[in-house]
Image (cartoon, helix red, strand yellow):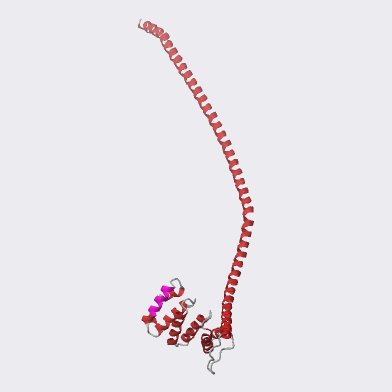
Amino acid sequence: MFRRLSVLILVAAVPLWAAAANREMQELQRDVAQLQDLVKSLQLTVNDKLSALQVQVQSSSEAANRANSAVAAVQRSLEQILRDQENKLVPPMIAMGTRLDQVSTGVGTMQQAVTDLASLMTRLQTQIADLNNAVKVIQTPATPPPASVEKPSLPASDLFENADRDRRSGKLDLALQEFAEYMKWYGDTALASDAQYYIGWIHQSQNDLESAVKDFDGMVQNYPDAKKVPEALFYKGKALILLGRTTEANDTFKDLRKRFPTHDLARQSLSIKPATGRQ
């Protein structure tokens, strides 16, 4: 009895189990189908993205190639421009350098010519003074000098050149005599101030400092516009220092700096210390 009942229950339950299993199978198949659709959609999306990315990469590569070509073209153009500019500029610059050298040489020649002309003008002035003196002598008879005094036979320019040559060669006594003779007879010529200055210079070289001070002082007073006035003031001050007359020396140097503030000797005088003696 109980066995039959169990069999009946089992037989009744089999269709119910089969129906449940069939539903689960259908649901599983539906889920699988949905999953396959999702995978297909995802695959399509990935393919689209990869295609778009490949297009972008190809476009970037092409743009980079075009940019490289453009840069190379610009570089070639710049190199060509530089070569053209070099070809245009280098020859004129070389020619300009040559021209500057020629101009510099011409300026040096001109400066030398100006120096020579200035020397010639000085000589001409001296010769004109000689002629004027000769005319005065001819027109106005002068008082005959003492028998022991004779006017030099040389013109002023030659007498000055002889004296200066003897000074530069170390014949100071002979030069001093010649400069003194020049001052005696040609004291109103263009070179008189130089002759007076060199007399003081020779006295100072011979350590005759008192005479040197008087000579330089006379040169400054009698020829205030002469070009050697700064030198006369400078060496007068040094001679005064060596004589121990420091106050007079300082006053002389102050006068030098006041009258000729930009002269090299004026600046040099600032470094002379009276207590050190000869500078």
The quarter of the rendered structure image containing the C terminus is bottom left
- Residue 256 counted in the magenta span: yes
Range shown magenta: 249-259
Relative to 122, say whether 72 is above or below. above
- Residue 48 counted in the magenta span: no
Query: So how many labels did they put on this image?
Result: 0
Q: Position of residue 135 (x, y in %)?
A: 58, 83
Image position of 184 (left or right of 250): right
Q: Position of residue 244 (x, y in %)?
A: 38, 84
Foreground residue, 83 or 135?
135
Residue drawn at 55 percent across, 35 percent down: 60
Foreground residue, 115 or 239?
115
Foreground residue, 85 or 32?
85
> Can residue 161 be spotted in the picture?
no
Residue drawn at 43 percent across, 85 percent down: 214
The quarter of the rendered structure image containing the N terminus is top left
Q: Position of residue 118 (x, y in %)?
A: 57, 74
Dominant secondary-structure state across the stretch colored magenta: helix
Image position of 68 (left or right of 29): right
Foreground residue, 237 or 82?
237
Residue drawn at 42 percent across, 87 percent down: 210
Res 24 → quadrant:
top left
Relative to 235, say whether 36 is above or below. above
Residue at the left extreme, as displayed: 2
> Can residue 2 be spotted in the picture?
yes
Residue at the bottom extreme, as displayed: 147
Residue drawn at 49 percent across, 20 percent down: 37
Q: Position of residue 156 (x, y in %)?
A: 57, 83
Image position of 188 (left or right of 5): right
